[in-house]
Amino acid sequence: MSINVSGTEGYAEHAEVLANEWRGISFEDHHRPVLYLIPDAPSRILDVGAGVGRDAAAFASMGHAVLAVEPVDELRAAAKSMHPGSSVVWLDDSLPDLYLVRERANTFDVLMVTAVWMRLDETQRRRGMRTISELLVDGGVLILSLRHGPFPEGRRMFDVSAAETIQLAEAHGLHLMLNVRSGSAQQANRNKGVTWTRLAFRR
């Protein structure tokens, strides 16, 4: 079982159900608003909170070098099983500090933080943005999503605004490129009034 990392509550015991839900949403449909920000040339991509690896595997299939971070053992194991031939490197690590990623002394052209940021409390968000800024190369891109609306029972989430996130990112030298709000990709969540903000920044 996973050591409990704050923000991952409720995921280990529901890993199989979640994996089936996420499989039903294609990479292209989910990330259509930000795909133009992904470099055409082979690049170094860090996928934080990679879940079952849909995004990481898609990036690898495009020719990118991908490091996928997922702290929930059950989800990471599912990712490896679902993408056995992928070149993705899977790592047990998490925000706000990404200790193991930083130990590798890598920097990245693109850093994906999908459905993770609102799981961090205010102190963790401040630490996490500093970590992200240090891991991005000059000219590198951060792509981040925020969930709004009712939160699933048993999950640790906070109501984090786009305005707060933009201010924090800009304080760490990241410049806003995209701010788009849309409905959830999952019909059940749309029915509940869940919306998402997609933000992108350049260092």
Image (cartoon, rainbow, N blue to C red):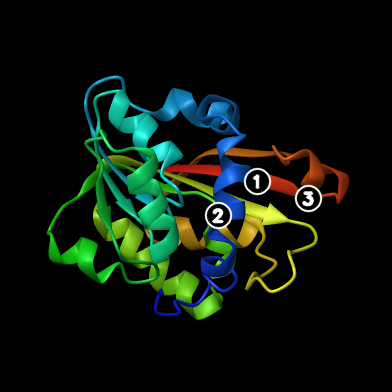
- In the rendered structure, the answer to whether residue 47 lies left or right of residue 137 reads right
> Label 1, label 2: how many angstroms apart (C-alpha)?
26 Å
* Residue under label 1: 197
Q: The disc labelled 2 sits on which kind of residue?
A: Glu
Rendered location of residue 2, percent (x, y): 40, 74
> Residue 194: which numbered mark, if any?
3
Name above or below for residue 4 compared with residue 19.
below
* Residue under label 2: 16
Q: The disc labelled 1 sits on which kind of residue?
A: Thr
Q: Reading the chain from its start, which is encountered first: label 2 or label 3?
A: 2
> Label 3, label 1: how many angstroms apart (C-alpha)?
10 Å
Rendered location of residue 119, percent (x, y): 57, 68
* Viewer-closest of 96 and 169: 96
Q: Which residue is at 30% across, 67% downward?
A: 98
Name above or below for residue 157 compared with residue 189.
below
Q: Secondary structure at mark 3?
A: loop
**Residue 127 picture quarter:** bottom left
* Viewer-closest of 126 and 34: 34
**Residue 199 picture quarter:** top right
Q: Secondary structure at mark 2?
A: helix
> Residue 82: which numbered mark, if any?
none
Few, some or many residues within 10 Å of mark 2 (<14, 14–19, 20+): some
Q: Which residue is at 34% across, 58% downward?
A: 132
Q: Which residue is at 53% across, 25% downward?
A: 28
| Viewer-nearest of discs 2 and 3 | 2
Count of picture labels: 3
> Label 2, label 3: how many angstroms apart (C-alpha)?
22 Å
